[in-house]
């Protein structure tokens, strides 16, 4: 095995996307994603049991497709990496069990890695040199986290996270209030394009001076969701037509504002001139637009991996595994299990 350019297979099953990726060092060879989103749409959100069963059905076809795309065999692999947490317990178990079975049957080393750090690891596949330290803002349906990454494989600090709903979860709930289908993020983004982001001033959670001591880098979107619900309810009770585009645009603006205000503040206050965005909510056009504007104004380098590597995927897990190997880290002990609350400071289980 080449320590500098190991051929690594990555498996990601933390939520509703079955991801299998293959990398050689920092070169992406395959990135196959099978989503069970349509199966959850009828329920308006991810159902853990359905997600786990969908992973069972999708994993083997995804593995076969990834090997074909990369034009390699299982025997060619140098190592296997898998998400061991955080995420949905049942979903994680499917990936962990599959990775252990492959590692044992093939006699390959296995690296159990952190899902959130994996999102940061996706940036090494961009084809450009990655500098540290960096501030990382990870925003998805299940996570909203602000990290200080001093070293990808050895030193990640959690600066702040959501204390209630994740941003993606808030998008789903507000979309439901407005009669828009699941998943809410793309639907809010689509409708908001025709709306006025300044039409309604919705609250920016944990952004008041009184919040700064305890929650300087933390997020809260539950109050925002409630504020939208009350605004819509008052309009309907008054017999008024709800301006869905304006509500969607104003809500999206509130989320974007608080995300980027705290992220840029972290860069400035920690003296880190780099910001990395990751997670499915990065697909939101307004989030990317405001991030570019504010980073340019503050002299901060903005890094956003390709959107196919921002959502949950196996390639980012493989990339993190390859970086661990290149840095001389030993494989994980096979006694590790799925850990739904794995702290971000635990890069490798």
Image (cartoon, rainbow, N blue to C red):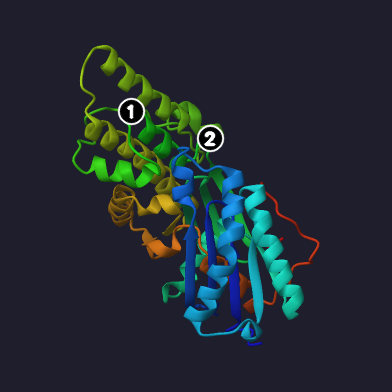
Q: Is residue 259 above or below residue 220?
A: below
Where is residue 151 shown, x and y percent of the image?
58, 65
Quarter of the view holding residue 179: top left
> Residue at image x 20%, y 37%?
195
Residue 317 falls left or right of residue 40: right
Q: Residues within 10 Å of mark 2 (few under 14, many from 20)?
A: some
Q: Secondary structure at mark 1?
A: loop
Work out whether mark 1 precedes mark 2 in sequence or the reverse, and give the earlier one: 1
Q: Disc 1 or disc 2, which is closer to the eye?
A: 1
Residue farthest top in this picture:
238
Q: Is residue 108 above or below residue 61?
A: below
Quadrant in which the N terminus is drawn: bottom right
Quadrant in which the C terminus is drawn: bottom right
Number of the label disc, if any, that sits on residue 215: 2
Where is residue 249 shown, x and y percent of the image?
26, 37
Mark 1, residue position: 202
Alpha carbons under labels 1 and 2: distance apart: 19 Å
Quarter of the view holding residue 296: bottom left
């Amino acid at each position: 095995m080449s320590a500098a350019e190991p051929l690594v297979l990555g498996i990601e099953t933390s939520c509703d996307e079955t991801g299998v990726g293959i990398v050689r060092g920092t070169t992406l060879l395959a990135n196959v994603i099978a989503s069970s989103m349509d199966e959850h749409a009828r329920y308006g959100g991810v159902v853990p049991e359905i997600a786990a069963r969908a992973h069972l059905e999708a994993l083997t076809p995804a593995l076969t497709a990834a090997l074909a795309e990369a034009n390699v065999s299982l025997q060619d692999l140098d190592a296997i990496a898998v998400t061991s947490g955080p995420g949905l317990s049942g979903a994680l178990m499917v990936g962990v069990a599959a990775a252990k079975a492959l590692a044992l049957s093939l006699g390959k080393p296995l690296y159990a890695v952190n899902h959130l750090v994996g999102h940061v690891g996706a940036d090494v596949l961009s084809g450009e040199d990655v500098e540290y330290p960096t501030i990382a803002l990870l925003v998805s349906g299940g996570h909203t986290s602000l990290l200080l990454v001093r070293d990808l494989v050895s030193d990640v600090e959690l600066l702040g996270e959501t204390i209630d709903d994740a941003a993606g979860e808030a998008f789903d709930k507000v979309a439901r209030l407005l009669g828009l289908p699941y998943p809410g993020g793309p639907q809010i983004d689509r409708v908001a394009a025709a709306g006025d982001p300044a039409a309604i001033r919705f609250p920016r959670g944990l952004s008041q001076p009184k919040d700064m001591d305890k929650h300087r880098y933390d997020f809260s979107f539950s109050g925002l969701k409630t504020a939208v619900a009350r605004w819509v309810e008052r309009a309907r009770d008054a017999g008024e037509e709800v301006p869905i585009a304006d509500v969607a645009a104003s809500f999206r603006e509130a989320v974007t504002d608080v995300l980027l205000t705290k992220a840029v503040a972290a860069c400035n206050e920690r003296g880190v001139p780099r910001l990395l965005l990751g997670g499915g909510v990065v697909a939101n056009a307004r989030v990317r637009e405001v991030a570019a504007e504010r980073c340019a104004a503050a002299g901060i380098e903005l890094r956003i991996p390709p959107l196919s590597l921002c959502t949950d995927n196996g390639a980012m897990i493989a990339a993190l595994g390859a970086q661990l190997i290149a840095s001389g880290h030993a494989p994980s002990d096979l006694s590790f299990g799925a850990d739904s609350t794995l702290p971000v400071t635990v890069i490798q289980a």
